[in-house]
Image (cartoon, coloured by chain):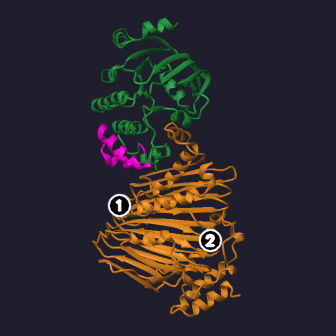
Chain colours: A green, B orange
Amino acid sequence: MNSELKIEGLRVEVAGKEVLKGLDLTMHSGEVHAIMGPNGSGKSTLAHALTGHPGYRVLDGSVTIDGVELLTMSPTDRAREGLMLVLQQPFEIPGVRSYDLLRAAGADPTTLRERMLDEARRIELPPELLDRFVNVDLSGGERKRAEMVQLGVLRPKFALLDEIDSGLDVDALDAVAKRLTAATTEWNCGVLAITHFRRLLLELTPTMIHVMSNGRVVATGGPELAVTLERDGYETFRDASA
Amino acid sequence: MTTFADSASTFIAKRPDAATRRLAWSLYEATGLPTTTDEVWRYAPLSDLDLEHFEVPSAPQQTPDSDFATQLCQRAGLVVRVVDGFCVSTGDVVEGVTVEVDQSSESLAGETLLHRYEGDTFALLNAALSPGATVIRVAAGVNVAQPVVVLNESTTGASFPRTQIVVGRGASVTVVEYFEGGRDALVVPVSEYRLDDNASLQLITYQRLDSTAWHVARTTGFLSRDARLHQAVVGLGAHYDRSRNDAEMLGAGAANELRTTFLGSGHQVHDFRTRQYHVAPRTTSKLLSKGAVADHSRSIYTGLIEIEKGAKRTDARQTNHNLLLAPNAHADSVPNLDIRENDVMCAHASSVGPLDELQRWYLESRGVSRDDAQRLLIQGFFYEMLAALPSELAGLVESDVASVLASVAAVTS
C-alpha cells in the first residue's frame, strides 16, 4: 500500500519556547527522507512531537497519514496508525520484556516468538538478549538492534529515526541501515531519518534531504544536498531562513 | 468460645518445653501488644487487632493446596510442607540436605529466641506458640541444584510458623518460602537464615495470604565471611502485611541483596521494615524496595542501615520507590542511617509519586494502550524482583503475579 505522511504548518512549544515554527514536509511509503540540521534547529522536537511525547505542546498545524489527523490522537493510536519512533537513547524499562511489550502492542502471539528470533538473527542481536528487560543491561549498539527487532515485528508505515547514528559503532550502523533499507521494500516502509551527520546516509540512501534551521525546513533536495552540507556547513541555509 | 489466652495455655501445657514457652508467654503478657504510639508500629491498624478473635490450634487442620501451590511443588526439588505452623512433611530425601523439627527454642544467632527477640511482642508469641522450628540444613560444599519450597499454609486461627535455614560452608541453595490461606487468620512467621563462610542462599519469600489475614513476619539473615544472601520479598496478600527483614553481616566480605515489593489494594496496609547491620569490614548490602498502592491502601517503608565501628570499607545502598495509583492511597518512606565508622560508602534514595511518564510514553509510542502500559510497568516491579528465580519457577510465579494484578482495577485505569 502506498501511504502519505503529510506535515503542515507544525508549530511546537517546549518548556514555554516555540521550537518548531511552521514546518512542512511530505513523504510517501518506501521513500527514505533525511532531515539534517544543526543542533537546536528543532530536529528532535519534530520526532517527539509527532509521537506525542508529554513534554512537547503542539500549538498549531497538522500531521496526517493518508488524510487521517494524528495530532488529536493518543500516542498509542498514532503508533497504531503506523508511526514508530526509534529513539537516540531508548528508555530502559525494568521488569518489562520485549515479548510482553510487543504482545501488548498488538503482535500476533502465535507467531511472535518466531518473528522476534527471526528479526534478531537478521540484525545480529544474540537471541538470548531478547529475554532481557527492554533495553536493560544492553550496550548502545544492542539497544539500537533491539529497536530494529521491534520495528521488524511492528512493521510501521513510517519509521522516524532520531539521531540513531550517534554513539553507534560502524558495524551496528551498517546493520541498522541494511535492515531499514530492506524494510522499504519488504513492507514499503517509509523512513524519516533525523541526523546530525552524513555517516548514516552513506549506508541508508535517502531519496530526499530536508535541511532544518530555526524550526522550519529551509531547503529540500536530492542526495546531492548532503554533499553540499558536508562541504559548506549549515551557514548558507541559516541565512536563507532569516 | 475458646479465647486466644485459653487455647494458648492449652497448647503450651502439652509441649515438652512448656516452661520456656510459659516464660515467653509471660514476657508477652507483661508488655502486651504494641500500640501505635510506639514509633515502629505507628502506621499499623493495631486498634482493629483483637487476639481473642484467634484460636491457637493444637494440631494442623486439613486444607487443600491451591492450584498454584500444586504447580509450585511440582517444580521443586524438595517440598517441605507446613500447615498452621506444624511441619507435616519434610519431603523427599535430597543428598546433602536434612530437614527436621527442632523444639529447642534456640535462635540461629546462638542465643535463645527469648533473648534474641526480647521486646518484639509478636516474635515472643512465636517463641511461645510455634509448634517448633522447621530446620533445613545444607551440608558444607553442597550445591543444591533444584529449588527447595517451604509451603506454608494457614487455615483459621493463629499460626506461628518458624523456619530456620542453615547453609554450610561453601554450599548454595535456592529456597522459596510461600504463604497462602489464612482466612480471618493471624499468621506470625519467624524465619532465620545462617550462612556459613562463603555460603550462598537465594531466597524468595512470596506472601499470598487471604485478604482478611493479619501477617506479621520477621526474617533475619546471619552472614559469615564472604557469604551471600540474596533475598526477594513479595507481599501481595493479607489485610495487614508486616514484614521485617534484617541481615547481619558478621564476617568480612559478606554480601546481602534485599529486594522487597508489594501491591496494595482495597484498605490493605503493607508495612515493610529492614535493618542491614554491618559488623565486619568489606561487607555490602544493596536494598531495593519498590511498591505500588491503589484504592485506599497504604504502605510504609522504614529502612535502617547500621554500620559498626571497625566495619571498614562497608558499601551499603538503599533505594525505595513508591508508586501512587489512586488519590486516596498513601505511601510513607523513612530511610535511616546509623554509622559509627568513617571509611564507608553509604547511599540512600527514596521517592513517592506517580508512574514514570516517559517510560509509559515509550510503551504507548509502540502501540501499547495506556492501561496496558500501566499494567506492564507495575507488573515490571514484581518481575524485576523475581528475576532471581530459577527458570523452572519464574514463569509460574510471574503468571500468578499477573493474575493478581489483573484483579486490581486501579492497576489498569
Q: Quadrant of the N terminus of chain B?
A: bottom right
Q: From the viewer's side, name the closer residue of B143 and A3.
A: A3
Q: Which mark is residue B253?
A: 1
Looking at the rendered structure, whether the residues under marks 2 and 1 are on a common chain is answered as yes
Q: Residue at 39% across / 77% down in the picture?
A: B136
Query: Which image quadrant for residue B7?
Result: bottom right
The residue lying furthest to the front in this view is A1
Q: Please name the amino acid that badge 2 sits on.
A: Ala
Which x, y percent locates residue B143? Answer: 29, 69
Mark positioned earlier in the residue sequence (2 or 1): 2
Work out whether residue B335 can be spotted.
Answer: yes
Mark whose residue sits in front, 2 or 1: 2
Chain of the residue on which disc 2 is drawn: B
Measuring from the top left, give residue B37's x and y in whole percent.
70, 66
Is B315 in front, or is B47?
B47
Question: Which residue is tagged 2?
Answer: B213
Tag 1: amino acid: Gly
User: Can residue A116 be found in the magenta stretch?
Assistant: yes
Alpha carbon separation for disc pair 2 and 1: 39 Å
- In the image, the segment drawn in magenta is A109-134
Q: Is residue B119 magenta?
A: no
* Front one among B308 and B258: B258
The image quadrant that residue B75 belongs to is bottom left
Residue at 51% x, 49% y: name it: B376
